[in-house]
Image (cartoon, grey):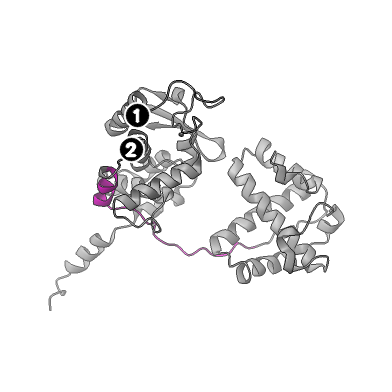
Amino acid sequence: MLQAYQDVPYFLKDFITYMEAIRGKSKNTVKEYFFDLRTFLRYMKVLRGQASLDDFEEISIAEIDIDFIAGITLHDLYEFLSYTSSERLNNANSRARKVAALRSFFKYLHVKAKLIDDNPARDLDSPKIPKSLPKYLSLDESRALLENIEGNNHYRDYAIITLFLNCGMRLSELVGINLRDIKEEKLTVIGKGNKERVIYLNQACMKALDDYIKNERPHEGIKAPHQNALFISRNKRRISNQTVQHIIKKHLKAAGLDDTKYSVHKLRHTAATLMYQYGHVDVRVLQEILGHTDLSTTQIYTHLDNEQLRKAADSNPLSEL
């Protein structure tokens, strides 16, 4: 358990353990929930006149007891969401995540731990999230990105970007790949909620991985417990999320692409969009490839790109009048 989880009330630590060990939530999700709930409890102390906003990040929540929690109302929850919107400038997505954390936390206290008689978050509404089309690289931009990978660790970086653009995997999935996860043309990854899925590797992926393993991946001196990791850093450890993000930004710049507009996750969007638009992949197959639990999450990739929309408009027989 992270050191940050130590100076907190016992019921919050129990909730964190429950979410990770019983519900199977990923470490990243659990960490985000913890930070959201810590922010919430700090704000509750401010709201009760027990602390000041001036030193908000230093407010201790260690002494909060269950009686304090039992006194929290639905109105308090909306006060908190208003604060995160107006003062902390959280967008709708961030506030929706906080709502999810609060719902799970109070449901656990009420139903599982039976520490409170009422659940104030039961009727808590989540903010409406505006629908927007995902940003992605065009086919030509994707090719330019791959063609401009040079310098040290060329084979490693090329393999990383090739996997992102062809397989649509998440950052955590790529970083977590072990050598034994690759069997012929199949790659096994661990996705959200520790769910395992198989990704089929095409010829480009197989060649990129083969070139990297033969030419660049070190076979000696790798520090324990990283010996089985596929992608290794210069420090002979499993490559980190931050290093991969730096790699992507570096090569985006080298290809003349906007590294502030695109990111690792945008490469996942790119893979999904290219598969749908050029491969005519069925949306349910795409759902399996991406590891989405809900089909509605995958359906954002059924959009049409701007060029298709322009051509549709130009095809109107009244367009030239």
**Mark 2 highlights which residue?**
158
In the rendered structure, the answer to whether residue 289 lies left or right of residue 236 reads: left
User: Residue 179 got which mark?
Assistant: none
Q: Decide if residue 275 is in sight here.
A: yes
Q: Please provide percent x and percent y for residue 255.
A: 29, 51
Residue contact at pointers 2 and 1, CB within 8 angstroms: yes
- Tally of marks: 2
Residue 65 pos. (x, y %): 85, 53
State which quadrant residue 84 falls in: bottom right
Distance from the alpha carbon under mark 2 to that under mark 1: 8 Å
Does the magenta segment cover residue 105? no
* 267 left or right, relative to 306: right
* Residue at x 62% of width, y 37% of height: 24
Q: Where does residue 41 sit, x and y in percent of width and height?
A: 75, 58
Query: Which residue is farthest top?
Result: 220
Nearest the camera: 16 or 311?
16
Q: Quadrant of residue 13?
A: top right
Q: Secondary structure at mark 1?
A: helix
Say whether residue 126 is magenta: yes
Tell me the quadrant of the picture where the N terminus can be found: top right
Type of amino acid at the residue the image marks with label 2 = Tyr
Viewer can see residue 75: no
Classify mark 2: helix, strand or loop. helix
- Residue in the picture at 34% in, 23% down: 214
Q: Is residue 13 left or right of residue 35?
A: right
Magenta stretch in the rendered image: 125-146
What residue do we see at 14% from left, 71% from top? 317
Q: Which residue is mark 1?
A: 212
Amino acid type at mark 1: Tyr
The residue nearer to you, when weighing 110 against 162, is 162
